Amino acid sequence: MNCHLKRVLIGTLIMLGLASAQLVVAQTITIRMLHGKSGKPLSNKNVTMVWSPDFVSWHGTEVHLGKDGTGAFEVPPGKEIAEISPGPKVGKEPNRIPYIDCNAPLFPRIQISAVLKEGFVACNTCSKKTAAARPGEIVLWAMPLPWWQPDMQ
């Protein structure tokens, strides 16, 4: 077999292999946190995505929400259900209460495929404010802790 024919055969086999291989595409989800009464973005907060079946361990993906109240994360491969928990608190004492959670149900469980397809908006227990989510987006509600309220767990 001559060199040219070997190269064509190897190239064809590589192309067939690439065509039949499943491409793993990272799925990115955005979280948007809104003030439970005003509907304005809440900045500089954290939420934790706890993945099924690890709900009892409370270890998950920590997502920081920046100045515009949004943050993004990549869904770990094979994860389909997540529970959203508040915190940790930003700053020197992360084990304190980070904010008043206005979401119903508390620690909502979401299906990732539904979020990617149509988005997810938690029910707001702090007011009648509502919002719409875009595909790939989770909308959460919270209130800052008043200065007089202790933030101990």
Image (cartoon, rainbow, N blue to C red):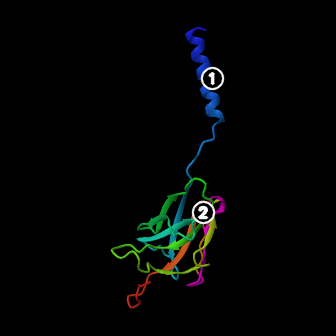
The image position of residue 64, as x and y in percent, is 44, 66
Mark nearer the viewer, 2 or 1: 1
Residue 140 drawn above or below residue 71: below
Q: Is residue 67 magenta?
A: no
Tell me which amino acid carries mark 2: Arg
Q: Which of 149 and 88 is in front in this view?
A: 88
Q: Residues within 10 Å of mark 2 (few under 14, many from 20)?
A: some
Query: Which image quadrant is residue 9 in?
Result: top right
The answer to whether 31 appears left or right of 64 in the picture is right
The residue that label 1 is drawn on is 12
Residue 150 drawn above or below residue 41: below
- Name the quadrant of the N terminus: top right
The image position of residue 148, as x and y in percent, is 39, 91
Task: Identify the disc placed on residue 62.
Answer: none
Furthest-top residue in view?
A: 2
How much space separates mark 2 and mark 1, taking CA atoms?
A: 42 Å
Residue depicted at 59% across the width and 22% down the height: 11
Residue depicted at 57% across the width and 47% down the height: 25
Residue 146 drawn above or below residue 29: below
Local SS, label 2: loop
Local SS, label 1: helix
- Name the quadrant of the C terminus: bottom left
Task: Identify the disc placed on residue 134.
Answer: 2
| Range covered by the magenta-colored residues | 113-128
Q: Nearer the viewer, residue 116 or 97?
A: 97
